[in-house]
Amino acid sequence: TLVVNVSLIIGILIPGVLFKNYEFKDENIESGKKLSFLLMALETALAVLCFVPNIIFQAEKPPTPPSESADTVREPLSKEISKLIQAIKQLVKNKNYILLLFGFGLYFGLFNAISITLSQLLKPWFGNNSLAIAAVGGSPVISGIIGVLIIGHFQRKSGKFRKWIIICMLG
């Protein structure tokens, strides 16, 4: 969803803004520790800021069932677990599911690996300018949002989902 992508951008930009003038050297270790603590405190404050309104305003149950299955009477947990195991076995045997699993898993792993090592990869061009590095790190997410808006329209219009997934994976 859009919320996940926006939070990704914010998560990439905040450390860049916070560490923009920091240079990793032996004499700056204490400063780095203070900035890291400040970053953790800021993340904690943001988490609490999101959590508290949720606790206050979230209803115990929605006024209407969110889906048709929400009205159904549930079976005992042991039967539910056995059905879950059966469904997982069916998924593992499904070739298309395995292809999607590997495709998206590889993409997600690659995205995380690049995000983690981005500052070291871009250091020759940007030096210690963490804000510029954070902007470069956020650009794939922003372009992904734009791409979803554009390609999603064509995908729904043509009805050829597999073709568009392949085009996006190649891109």
Image (spheres, rainbow, N blue to C red):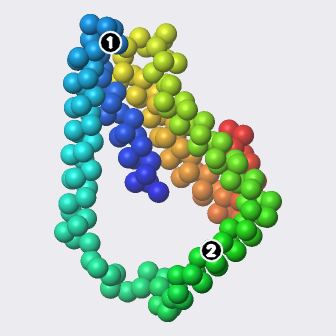
Quarter of the view holding residue 84: bottom right
Which residue, as the protein is rendered here, is positioned at the far front?
78
- Depicted 86 relative to depicted 170: above or below: below
Q: Nearer the viewer, residue 102 or 142?
A: 102
Q: Secondary structure at mark 2?
A: helix
Q: Nearer the viewer, mark 2 or mark 1?
A: 2
Q: Secondary structure at mark 1?
A: loop
Residue 141, how many percent across, how many down?
Answer: 49, 41
Q: Amino acid at mark 2?
A: Leu
Residue 74, how many percent across, how many down?
Answer: 51, 88
- Depicted 7 relative to depicted 87: above or below: above
Q: Is residue 61 left or right of residue 99?
A: left
Q: Amino acid at mark 1?
A: Glu
Q: Nearer the viewer, residue 151 or 131?
A: 131
Marks 2 and 1, the one that precedes in the sequence: 1
Q: Residue at x 40, y 54 (%)?
A: 3
Quarter of the view holding residue 171: top right
Q: Residue at x 64, y 63 (%)?
A: 156
- Depicted 170 relative to depicted 162: above or below: above
Classify 10 Å Cα crowding around label 2: few (below 14), some (14-19), many (20 and above). Answer: few
Residue ID for mark 2:
84
Q: Is residue 140 left or right of residue 92?
A: left
As drawn, the label of residue 23 is 1
Residue 164 shows in this picture: no
